[in-house]
Image (spheres, rainbow, N blue to C red):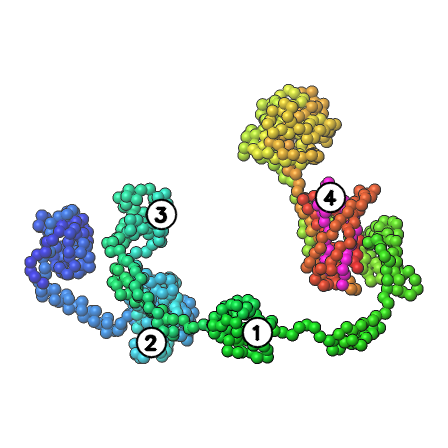
């Protein structure tokens, strides 16, 4: 090295430190190990212990001087002899390692496949067949005893999951035995060894136990990047929320978003470095013009062509267009032939019923008489057809029919006398024979409906109800008729009810199919104060520490405990609950105070209001009197017969149970109206002896809620096992003493359904009405 000291920049070093930091220094290649660091200000030196690998950091022997900051320095090069000797020793050490290990790390092969530490200096795979291996286990020490865990751990620093790099394993003694495997995932620390996830690439030969191996890793290169990556958003617009890397067009140039923001004014955002120019708008080119030049007709079959005879800025397009093939000559129709008309080539005329075409110009030359088809002036185009007049060649006589062919042009056909009806009749009446010949008919005087005996419909209903009663008494379905086509089912047993296929079906009551019900829920909040979740409690009066809201704290008090509402020296009073939003209440509960039954309410009204004024606008929802309590702490529930929606509910107590001083209520709840689900239930499939065309039913229902047949409940029928259903028209006939409604359907046509012999009925409730089906009489024809 040159003997001139190096002194570019300044240094910072602490007393006792073995590291020097440089400012504006360039030490790599300028200084070497064994050179001397000299600080003129202190007259002290330190030896450089390693070749610098960083222009701003240098290793030295411990600095004996005082701490320095941005101080001047000099690097005094060591003599060439000292430097050369140190370099020679380093090179010999490096060559010995290369000679011993070749290229890469030096290991021995373990033929075990267990996921465990293979032992110092050993490498193993998870499959003895190297081509099937998917993992490698490498000890943290190589075969020379050197710790290489840090080296191996860096093998997942590059690439991406699925492609970290390639692992090369080669036999030290047999260069033909080598294998390449891809490292696909992160290096896993196995405590004393590392685990690699692999995909086999290729190779040849094999390894035996204790074979010496050279292991080398080639990292996957980093993905390249495009000059500009981003999401194209089109022209820049104000008030739009842009993300980093969004691309926009503004003023003909393309800009990339450098900071997420909502657009204001582009110039302002650009000045604030929220945008950066990505592609600048180019110079405006000269305007181009296009004109049509020559258009040339070329021979049929020649290709069409276009050529620019102008320039790129002023184009002139010349076209070559091939001529089309000549078509067939047509006829110029002139109507009926006239001897006075001058005809020309291809004129067409009608003459003597045939169509003719002129072969040349002609006047007064008529077309020839058929069978001649051309005369030099005219050519036949379409010959006149034969007239329809002629003689009957053959007539075949049928049974009881005779044919007279004396005149073949007018054959006479005779038939026997047929049945004869009256001169007039009434539509809809039955026709009857009027003598014994079977050939004379008369008006029967009755329609089909008039022939049905009086009371026949009532008889059918009576028979149906009797069948249902027998089915109810025997607790089983009855099959009636000579072919079992009439079924009476009281649902005592559910054998012929498709329970599993029902929707919202309750069978809790024996012999009854009814909708399920969603019970109402307490709508009041759990109060810890007068106002809770927007709901507010108030009262006419209250005793200190016995607040109105404590009647809604969901805590049942004991004796005189502070968990109830007590009036202030009054035996009557009102307790009010204001909901945040209007509620429809179907029932409510009142709980008396434990130990004080005489203070419990005895008579009251429950009122509802939309305004909370209770000055005449309120509605009385429920009235109770003579209410007694067993001993306090007892909850009683009361239903509201006509629920409606209100924001304010007031319990106005007009008497207690005898206490001379106080009225006490422990808890009150307001419960929403229960909801009746819509029911759908059907029978199982019955078996018909023949394909039914009509069906009918008679059912008995209990209309718990006011309901209308056909509107709030329906019946349907099917002949194909329930794939296709037909609606049945229902008529409410009468009510039984037991409160059941007898409902009959009209005859229902099912002939339009797909053919089938599996009749079924289906009952539905609608509009959330409680309607119970108690039995069904179902039949088909």
Q: Which of marks 2 and 4 is in front?
A: 4
Q: Are marks 3 and 1 in contact (CB under 8 Å)?
A: no
Q: Residue 97 carries which label?
A: none
Return the disc, 2 or 1, that comes first in the chain's sequence. Answer: 2
User: Gap between marks 3 and 2, in whole Å?
Assistant: 54 Å
Do residues under tags 2 and 4 come within 8 Å of each other at their CB atoms?
Answer: no
> What residue sits right under mark 3 in the picture?
242
Which residue in the structure is indicated by mark 1?
A: 382
- Lower sequence index among marks 2 and 4: 2
The residue drawn where x is 67% and y is 49% is 504
Label 3 Cα neighbours within 10 Å, binned few <14 / some 14-19 / many ≥20: many
Identify the residue under disc 2.
Answer: 178
- Mark 3 or 2, which is nearer the eye? 3
- Disc 2/disc 4 C-alpha distance (Å): 90 Å
Residue at the image position 78 percent from the left and 75 percent from the top: 407
> For the residue labelled by badge 4, is the local secondary structure a helix, a strand or a loop?
loop
In the picture, measured across the screen, residue 394 lies left or right of residue 222, that is right
Q: Name the residue under label 4.
A: 708
- Queried whether the magenta region covers residue 601, the answer comes back as no
Compute the Cα span from label 3 to label 1: 79 Å
Q: Is residue 580 left or right of residue 454?
A: left
Let me know if residue 235 appears in the view: yes
Q: What element carries label 2?
A: strand
Task: Tell me if 101 is positioned left or right of 608 in this view.
Answer: left
Given this view, does label 3 or label 4 mark the residue nearer the observer?
4
């Amino acid at each position: 090295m040159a003997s001139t000291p190096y002194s570019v920049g300044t240094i910072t070093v602490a007393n006792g430190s073995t590291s020097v930091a440089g400012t504006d220094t360039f030490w790599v290649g300028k200084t070497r190990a064994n050179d001397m660091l000299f600080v003129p200000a202190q007259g002290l030196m330190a030896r450089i212990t390693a070749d610098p690998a960083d222009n701003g950091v240098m290793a030295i022997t411990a600095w004996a001087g005082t701490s320095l900051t941005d101080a001047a320095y000099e690097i005094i090069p060591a003599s060439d002899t000292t430097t050369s000797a140190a370099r020679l020793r380093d090179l010999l050490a490096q060559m010995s390692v290369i000679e011993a290990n070749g290229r890469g790390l030096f290991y021995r092969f373990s033929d075990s496949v267990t996921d465990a530490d293979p032992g110092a200096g050993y490498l193993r795979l998870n499959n003895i067949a190297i081509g099937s291996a998917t993992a490698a286990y490498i000890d943290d020490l190589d075969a020379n005893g050197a710790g290489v865990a840090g080296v191996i751990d860096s093998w997942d620093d590059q690439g991406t999951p699925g492609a970290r790099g390639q692992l090369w394993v080669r036999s030290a003694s047999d260069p033909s035995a080598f294998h390449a495997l891809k490292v696909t995932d992160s290096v896993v620390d196995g405590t004393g060894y590392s685990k690699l996830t692999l995909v086999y690439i290729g190779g040849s030969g094999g390894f035996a136990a204790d074979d010496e191996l050279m292991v080398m890793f080639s990292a996957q290169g980093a993905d390249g990047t495009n000059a500009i990556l981003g999401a194209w958003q089109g022209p820049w617009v104000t008030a739009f929320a842009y993300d980093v890397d969004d691309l926009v067009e503004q003023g003909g140039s393309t800009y990339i978003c450098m900071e997420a923001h909502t657009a204001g004014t582009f110039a302002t955002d650009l000045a604030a470095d929220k945008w950066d120019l990505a592609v600048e708008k180019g110079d405006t080119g000269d305007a181009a013009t296009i004109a049509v030049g020559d258009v040339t007709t070329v021979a049929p079959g020649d290709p069409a062509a276009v050529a620019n005879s102008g320039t790129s800025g002023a184009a002139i397009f010349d076209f070559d267009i091939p001529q089309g093939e000549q078509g067939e000559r047509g006829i110029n129709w002139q109507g009926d032939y006239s001897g006075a008309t001058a005809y020309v080539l291809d004129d067409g005329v009608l003459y003597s019923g045939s169509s003719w075409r002129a072969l040349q110009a002609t006047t007064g030359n008529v077309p020839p008489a058929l069978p001649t088809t051309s005369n030099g002036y005219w050519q036949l185009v379409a010959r006149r057809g034969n007239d329809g007049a002629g003689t009957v060649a053959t007539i075949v006589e049928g049974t009881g029919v005779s044919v007279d062919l004396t005149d073949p042009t007018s054959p006479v056909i005779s038939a026997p006398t047929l049945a004869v009806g009256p001169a007039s009749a009434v539509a809809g009446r039955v026709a009857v024979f009027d003598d014994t010949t079977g050939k004379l008919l008369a008006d029967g005087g009755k329609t089909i409906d008039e022939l049905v005996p009086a009371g026949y419909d009532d008889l059918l209903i009576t028979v149906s109800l009797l069948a249902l009663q027998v089915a109810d008494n025997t607790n089983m379905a009855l099959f009636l008729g000579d072919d079992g086509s009439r079924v009476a089912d009281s649902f005592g047993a559910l054998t012929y009810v498709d329970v599993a296929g029902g929707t919202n079906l309750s069978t809790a009551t024996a012999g009854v199919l009814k909708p399920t019900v969603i019970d109402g829920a307490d709508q009041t909040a759990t109060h810890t104060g007068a106002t809770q979740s927007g709901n507010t409690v108030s009262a006419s009066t209250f005793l200190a520490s016995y607040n109105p809201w404590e009647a809604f704290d969901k805590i049942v008090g004991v004796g005189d405990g502070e968990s109830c509402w007590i009036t202030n020296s009054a035996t009557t009073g009102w307790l009010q609950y204001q909901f945040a939003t209007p509620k429809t209440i179907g029932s409510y509960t009142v709980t008396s105070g434990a130990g004080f039954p005489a203070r419990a309410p005895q008579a009251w009204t429950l009122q509802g209001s939309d305004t909370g004024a209770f000055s005449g606008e309120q509605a009385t929802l429920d009235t109770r009197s003579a209410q007694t309590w067993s001993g306090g702490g007892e909850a009683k529930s009361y239903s509201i017969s006509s629920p409606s929606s209100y924001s304010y509910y007031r319990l106005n107590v007009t008497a207690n149970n005898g206490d001379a001083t106080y009225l006490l209520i422990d808890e009150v709840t307001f419960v929403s109206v229960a909801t009746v689900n819509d029911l759908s239930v059907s029978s199982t499939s019955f078996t018909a002896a023949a394909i039914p065309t009509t069906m009918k039913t008679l059912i008995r229902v209990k209309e718990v809620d006011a309901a209308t047949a056909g509107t709030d409940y329906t019946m349907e029928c099917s002949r194909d096992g329930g794939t296709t259903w037909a609606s049945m028209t229902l008529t409410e006939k009468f009510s039984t003493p037991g409160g059941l409604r007898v409902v009959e359907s009209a005859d229902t046509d099912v002939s339009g359904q797909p053919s089938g012999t599996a009749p079924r009925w289906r009952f539905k409730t609608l509009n959330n009405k409680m309607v119970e089906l108690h039995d069904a009489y179902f039949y088909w024809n």
